[in-house]
Amino acid sequence: MTPALSFSGVRQRIFAVASLAFVLTALVDGLAQSPQLHSGINAAPLAKEVNTYEYGDPVQRKRNLNALFAKLKIAKSGFVAQAILEQIWLAWHQSGRSDIDDLLSRAKINASEGEFQSAINKLDEVIRRAPDFAEGWNGRATVFFHMGRYEESLADIIETLKREPRHFGALAGRGRIFRRLGNDKAALEAFDEALLHNPFIPERRSLIPAIRNKLGIRDL
């Protein structure tokens, strides 16, 4: 995802991390297509439609995320959803601690360069220092997936969802793992759950319909 909303300082750095998470996810199963949410269309005109939030206070962070998810569910187009999703990923990548955010950022860079073990080492430290930070678990789950360590990835997805049950990225990741393992029914259940929280996940375009067709499921 390459949005055009303008961020500065630490917010710009954190947003870059969120964007990288999208890129890593899109590499899986040939999903690096160009749906609306990944089109790079200038979202700046939409900024006034979506409040720009700060996430230092956990209570306020949760309240703001609730508002963003409510907006996402009623978004009328991918253009509007793109701006909302940027804010959700921004919130998820802010731990409230600069040391954790820095470790997460460096781990994502390692992963993007194929240095998976270095990424795991940093994410291990993120989890050790901030075990309640969902994105530490989700980041490690993503790296485990790319290493083919599916059981460990699934375990970290469980931990992510304990901390953020609406994490559509983790849910979609679970779906991709089950698909790799040949369990299309479980994969579809995971994708359907992700859709409940984010109706604009890229898998909705071709992967989910393909699985439904394979299982003989017809939409009403």
Image (tube, rainbow, N blue to C red):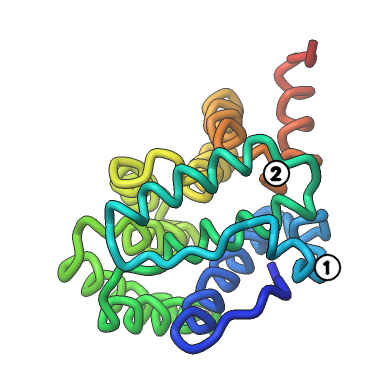
Residue 115 or residue 86, whichever sits in front:
86
Residue at point 74%, 52% (across, down): 80
| Mark 1 / mark 2, whichever is N-terminal | 1
The amino acid pointed to by label 2 is Phe
Residue 39 seen: yes
Q: Work out whether 56 lies above or below 211.
A: below
Query: Which dot marks residue 220?
Result: none
Looking at the picture, does residue 162 appear above or below residue 127?
above
Q: In x, y percent, where is residue 27?
A: 66, 63
Residue at x 57% of width, y 44% of height: 176
Q: Nearer the viewer, mark 1 or mark 2?
A: 1
Residue 167 shown left or right of residue 133 in the figure: right
Which numbered tag is attached to residue 41?
A: 1
Q: Residue 197 falls in which quadrant of the image?
A: top right
Residue 213: image x %, image y %? 79, 23
Mark 1 Cα-neighbour bin, 10 Å: few <14, some 14–19, many ≥20: some
Q: Which secondary structure, mark 1?
A: loop
Going by the picture, which residue comes out furthest to the left?
128
Is there any visible trace of residue 181 in the rendered image? no
According to the image, label 2 marks what residue? Answer: 200
Image point (78%, 32%), residue name? 210
Taking the spot 75% from the left edge, 71% from the top edge, the residue there is 44
In this image, 204 relative to 9: left or right?
A: right
Q: CA distance from mark 1 to mark 2?
A: 15 Å
Please name the amino acid that badge 1 sits on: Ile
